[in-house]
Image (tube, helix red, strand yellow):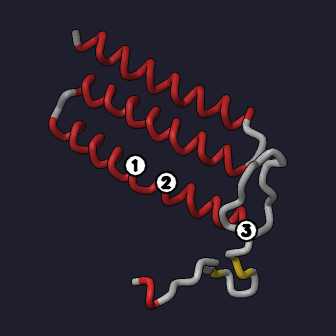
């Protein structure tokens, strides 16, 4: 039974990593590539590590796997956000068929700070 669980987890993990690689090649701009790879690779690595934890089954390996999965889930979205932010701020264009740019008009290129275009009125609170 353990062999089937290990086979299933590792196969799903490898499939998600493969789909991330295909998505990386097929996506038209850096922002979509970041989105695809962050989500799919994080899940794929988590599944592959889960299969390793089931395979070895010792307390030390399972605790290491849990720590690795925790740090990957913690750092992967932050890293992707920073790469996307730097890409936008350095002027890498969005895909030509992108429908909406949420940051347009909210970024000051001299100070590198975001500002809200919405004004808040104290009387509305």
Report the residue that reaches farthest toward the front: 123
Q: State which tag comes first along the sequence, 1 or 3.
A: 1
Q: Secondary structure at mark 1?
A: helix
Q: Please provide percent x and percent y for residue 65.
A: 29, 40
**Image vertical order of residue 23 relative to residue 75, above or below:** above
Q: Please provide percent x and percent y for residue 124.
A: 44, 83
The C terminus lies in quadrant: bottom left
- Residue at the spot of label 1: 73
CA distance separating discs 1 and 3: 29 Å
Is the C-beta separation of discs 1 and 3 under 8 Å? no
The residue sitting at 68% across, 51% down in the picture is 31
Is the C-beta separation of discs 2 and 1 under 8 Å? yes
Which marked residue is nearer to the observer: mark 1 or mark 3? Answer: 3
Report the residue that reaches farthest toward the right: 96
The residue sitting at 71% across, 82% down in the picture is 108
Q: How busy is the neighbourhood of tag 1: few (under 14 within 10 Å), some, or many (20 plus)?
A: some
- The front one of 121 and 95 is 121
- Residue at the spot of label 2: 77
Q: State which tag comes first along the sequence, 3 or 2.
A: 2
Q: Is residue 112 left or right of residue 48?
A: right
The residue sitting at 54% across, 45% down in the picture is 38
**Image vertical order of residue 37 relative to residue 13, above or below:** below
The N terminus lies in quadrant: top left
- Residue at the spot of label 3: 104
Which marked residue is nearer to the observer: mark 3 or mark 2? Answer: 3
CA distance separating discs 2 and 1: 7 Å
Q: Please provide percent x and percent y for residue 79.
A: 53, 58
Q: How busy is the neighbourhood of tag 3: few (under 14 within 10 Å), some, or many (20 plus)?
A: few
Q: Secondary structure at mark 2?
A: helix
């Amino acid at each position: 039974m353990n062999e089937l669980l290990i086979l299933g987890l590792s196969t799903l993990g490898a499939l998600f990593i493969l789909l991330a690689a295909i998505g990386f090649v097929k996506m038209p701009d850096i922002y979509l590539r970041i989105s695809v790879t962050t989500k799919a690779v994080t899940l794929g690595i988590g599944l592959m590590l889960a299969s390793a934890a089931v395979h070895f089954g010792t307390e030390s390996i399972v605790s290491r796997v849990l720590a690795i999965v925790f740090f990957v889930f913690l750092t992967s979205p932050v890293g992707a956000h920073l790469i996307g932010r730097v890409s936008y701020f350095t002027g890498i264009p969005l895909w030509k068929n992108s429908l909406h740019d949420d940051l347009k008009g909210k970024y000051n290129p001299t100070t590198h700070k975001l500002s809200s275009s919405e004004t808040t009125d104290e009387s509305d609170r």
